[in-house]
Image (cartoon, helix red, strand yellow):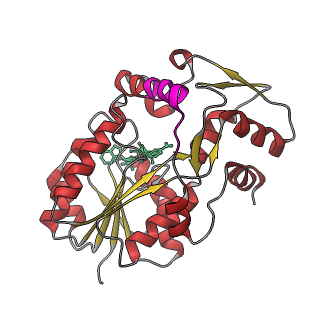
Amino acid sequence: MTGEIVVAGASGSSGRPLLAELLRQGVAVSAITHSADGAERLSALGASSVRHADFGDESALRGAFEGARAVYVIPPVLHPLEDEFVINAVRAATGAGVERFVYHSVLHPYTPALRNHLRKARAEAAVRDSSLRWTILQPSMYAQVVLAMLNGGGPEVSVPFDLEAPVSVLDLAELAEVGAKVLTEDGHEYASYELAGPLTTMKQMVAAIAAQRGVALRPVLVPPTSAPLPPAALEKPMAAADMISTFAHYDAHGFRGNPAVFQYLLGRAPNGFAQVVDRELGNR
Ligand SMILES: NC(=O)c1ccc[n+]([C@@H]2O[C@H](COP(=O)([O-])OP(=O)(O)OC[C@H]3O[C@@H](n4cnc5c(N)ncnc54)[C@H](OP(=O)(O)O)[C@@H]3O)[C@@H](O)[C@H]2O)c1
């Protein structure tokens, strides 16, 4: 195969580790950004090739995909037009004659109570119905996102859903390994891979952070409607509504997946939350 791999949405929390992994492997990669801040984050990562396009602009995307042998599409978190963005990317990749298309989705996209998941289900359908040689990755909750949410001050830590609800949490660095694998290896076309980390709970994750920091932390349940929102949902009513609904859904049902497929693709058991905490907070 010749040509670069192009990553769209590369400067975000999922994209940066993927880009770093591809660069580490010496793969020719180009990153797409639509913002000056994103371009700065990408050059700080060492990206030598940066292309500019907005997910809302199909012809700009097509230009950015020209000559690529594969594209990896990561839509922005909690964006109300995420499905339209992915459909634009599908059309652009088809028009640009790209061979391989990887869509970064979510675990359990068809969850009728959650608009943010349903947008991904709709986008997945468009990906599958295309003529592209596609792969869909369906990751569970990110350990690094939970860590950022829980690792503020203390001694009380606000938790926006049931402390004992079972949730599957994965390491973004390992997700990046799998992303690089499906982009660079044959044999992953027309696969939808559920990628779940090991099951844990918010109570156990707070305890893992406390143990690493050597401090006492007490998880305190706060109602989803008054929980602190992540930056992507601040001052954005639609995104905030989606985040609150997601917290409420986890509160009632958890977010459970099976790590077998992730383990198969990684070639080893996936990291648990405590291992991620040790690496991220302990500089290991
Ligand atoms: N958080 C989790 O636990 C979790 C779990 C599973 C799946 N996911 C899903 O994973 C996906 C990626 O999440 P993330 O946290 O990496 O997202 P993110 O941080 O929002 O990153 C996505 C990137 O998209 C780019 N972008 C935003 N608007 C754009 C536009 N109009 N045109 C082109 N690019 C645009 C931004 O980069 P530039 O500014 O450089 O353009 C941004 O860095 C989301 O769809 C999320 O739902 C998240």
Q: Position of residue 75 (x, y in %)?
A: 34, 47
Q: Quadrant of the C terminus?
A: bottom right
Residue numbers of the magenta segment = 243-256
Queried whether the magenta region covers residue 252, the answer comes back as: yes
Q: Position of residue 218 (x, y in %)?
A: 78, 26
The residue at the point 38 percent across, 35 percent down is 78
- In the figure, 6 relative to 200: above or below? below
- In the figure, 74 relative to 179: above or below? above
Q: Is residue 199 visible?
A: yes
Q: Position of residue 268 (x, y in %)?
A: 62, 69
**Mainly helix, strand or loop, the magenta region?**
helix
- In the figure, 116 relative to 44: above or below? above
User: Which quadrant of the structure image shows residue 95?
Assistant: bottom left
Queried whether the magenta region covers residue 259, the answer comes back as: no
Compared across the picture, whether 218 is left or right of 264 comes to right
Compared across the picture, whether 67 is left or right of 168 comes to left
Q: Nearer the viewer, residue 118 or 70?
A: 118
